[in-house]
Image: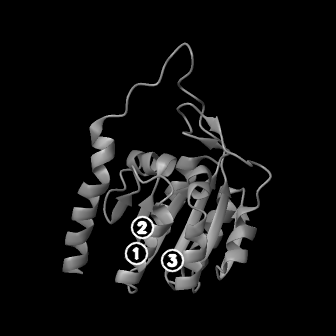
């Protein structure tokens, strides 16, 4: 499955839920023009699960879907335990397992790619359910039911990494400032939405 396909499935099934996305998923949702009720976890790499947990605890009536990356998850594995201990009921944590960091850019290998069983880690941490999908149709069929399952729910998606655009012949340019400002701007918009709903 490709990341755009996975994020399209999430966007179609989300209902009124807030999406917290990081790294590749953030850009996939941009391409899909999914802008409402969304928070990007940049520059807080590894913090998507915790941001989503804060939103889920503040407004338990509003569901949260976290779309994380495998490399991002590894940066703050303690977030799994924190989420599991808090037991947010309308919380779904999706991890894009593509085996690379900065997919579509420099594609650095993710430590433990292909060896680490992240759903098993989520189960061991105490998530209510954890599973993996490698087929977009199966994921699309299962997601509506998983969104209604009492959480926290963990889903790992086997995703093909996007081809690398940068390397020795084409260095990666600096990220624009707006990439580091977007989390604050989106948080303000989300705050307005929460205040009126």
| Near-viewer residue (71 or 59) | 71
Residue found farthest to the top: 169
> Looking at the image, do the residues carrying marks 3 and 1 touch, with CB atoms under 8 Å apart?
no
The CA distance from mark 3 to mark 1 is: 11 Å
Image vertical order of residue 27 relative to residue 116, above or below: above
Residue found farthest to the right: 115
> Looking at the image, do the residues carrying marks 1 and 2 touch, with CB atoms under 8 Å apart?
yes
Could you tell me residue 137's position as x and y percent? Answer: 66, 60
How many residues crowd around disc 1 within 10 Å: few (fewer than 14), some, or many (20 or more)?
some
Taking 14 as reference, is 131 left or right?
right
Q: Which mark is residue 128?
A: none
The CA distance from mark 1 to mark 2 is: 5 Å
How many residues crowd around disc 3 within 10 Å: few (fewer than 14), some, or many (20 or more)?
many
Secondary element at image label 1: helix
Q: Which mark is residue 51?
A: 2
For the question of whether residue 33 can be seen, the reply is yes
Q: Residue at x 70, y 46 (%)?
A: 111
Which residue position holds label 1?
54
Image vertical order of residue 114 relative to residue 104, above or below: below
Chain-order first, disc 3 or disc 2: 2
Secondary element at image label 2: helix
Q: Residue at x 46, y 25 (%)?
A: 172
> Looking at the image, do the residues carrying marks 3 and 2 touch, with CB atoms under 8 Å apart?
no
The CA distance from mark 3 to mark 2 is: 12 Å
Could you tell me residue 48's position as x and y percent? Answer: 47, 62
Could you tell me residue 170's position as x and y percent? Answer: 50, 16
Q: In the image, which is nearer the foreground, mark 3 or mark 1?
A: 1
Secondary element at image label 3: strand
Which residue position holds label 3?
91
For the question of whether residue 14 can be seen, the reply is no
Image vertical order of residue 97 relative to residue 139, above or below: above
Q: Residue at x 49, y 82 (%)?
A: 90
């Amino acid at each position: 499955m490709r990341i755009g396909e996975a994020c399209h499935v999430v966007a179609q099934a989300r209902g009124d839920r807030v999406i917290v996305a990081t790294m590749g998923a953030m850009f996939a949702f941009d391409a899909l023009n999914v802008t409402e009720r969304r928070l990007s976890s940049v520059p807080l790499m590894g913090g998507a699960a915790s941001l989503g947990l804060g939103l889920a605890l503040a407004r338990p009536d509003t569901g949260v879907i976290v779309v994380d990356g495998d490399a991002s998850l590894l940066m703050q594995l303690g977030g799994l335990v924190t989420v599991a201990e808090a037991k947010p009921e309308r919380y779904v944590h999706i991890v894009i397992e593509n085996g690379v960091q900065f997919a579509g850019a420099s594609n650095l290998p993710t430590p433990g790619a292909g060896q680490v069983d992240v759903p098993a880690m989520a189960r061991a941490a105490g998530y209510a359910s954890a599973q993996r999908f490698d087929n977009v149709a199966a994921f699309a069929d299962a997601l509506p039911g998983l969104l209604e399952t009492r959480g926290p729910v963990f889903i790992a998606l086997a995703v093909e990494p996007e081809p690398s655009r940068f390397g020795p012949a084409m260095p990666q340019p600096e990220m624009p400032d707006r990439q580091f400002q977007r989390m604050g701007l989106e948080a303000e918009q989300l705050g307005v939405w929460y205040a009126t709903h």
